[in-house]
Amino acid sequence: MQTRRETLKQSAVVAGLLASAGFPQFTHASVNKAAFDAKTVQDAARAAGAKSMAESKDVTIIGPDIAENGAVVPLGASTTLSGVKQLLIMVEKNPSALVALFNVTDTVDANFSTRAKMGQSSDVYAVALMNDGRALWAKKEVKVTLGGCGG
Amino acid sequence: MADPMRIRAQASGDKATIRVLMSHEMETGQRKDAAGKTVPAWFIQEVTAKLNGKDVFSAEWGPAVSKNPFLQFTVKGAKAGDKIAVTWKDNKGDTRTDEATVS
């Protein structure tokens, strides 16, 4: 006969085991969760490994001046610099600033575009993370007439 | 299993522009359903691409990428006839790979 208390204890152990073992598909994922959880542009860049931040003319952010639908805002980031490790696209006033993170290698051009959701009008950033830890950014204001984050 | 991706790969010179349209819900985890419950986040977390079986591109995405995401990137050293394979993996561990030929 197993008491309720024992059952609870056992299930706690099992839960602990599950938690420590984790789901295999998540444990070896290289996803930088801290950066995607960060609320502000600075925090996200820091979580991605940036040590200092500076504005740069060599980084370009592509986006519309006015986005009619915040659920699909075409955004692009590119740079002509060499020694770039990652290119980040961020939306300042989204619940989490970081939208996408592209790894720059010698097999791809440092020029990526995608579409993002924007909750409200905000500055959007392209951040180039350099190999030496510098983060160079460019920003652009995008006005959103209809938000894309529910509500 | 999610719907197939639409991939267009166009070579110009020694580079190829790859455009991908994926089919994914991309739930942010911010939305609430009619009953007031939060809809759990469900989004593509990792995107990778291979050119003729060799890794050439990788990216990490957050939930703020729009529904049915679009992606464009440029691969160096790709020519017509090369095979480009794009793979995504979402936060539920679901994954899908589609292949296209560079034209």
Image (tube, grey):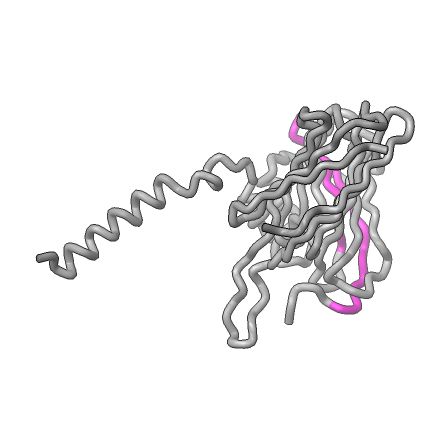
- At a point 21% along the width and 57% down the height, the residue shown is A8
Asked if A3 appears above or below B74 in the picture, the reply is: below
User: Which of these two is toward me, B80 or A100?
Assistant: B80
Residue lying farthest to the left in this orientation? A1
Quarter residue B31 falls in: bottom right
- Quadrant placement of the N terminus of chain A: bottom left
Between A109 and B91, the one nearer to me in the picture: B91
Q: Is residue A104 magenta?
A: no
Which secondary structure is most common in the magenta stretch?
strand
Residue B61 location (% of width, % of height) = 64, 45
Vertical placement of residue A51 versus A140, above or below: above
Q: Is residue A142 magenta?
A: yes
The image position of residue A139, as x and y in percent, is: 79, 48
Quarter of the view holding residue A84? top right
Is residue A108 visible in the rendered structure shown here?
yes
Task: Point out the stretch of residues depicted in magenta.
Answer: A123-146
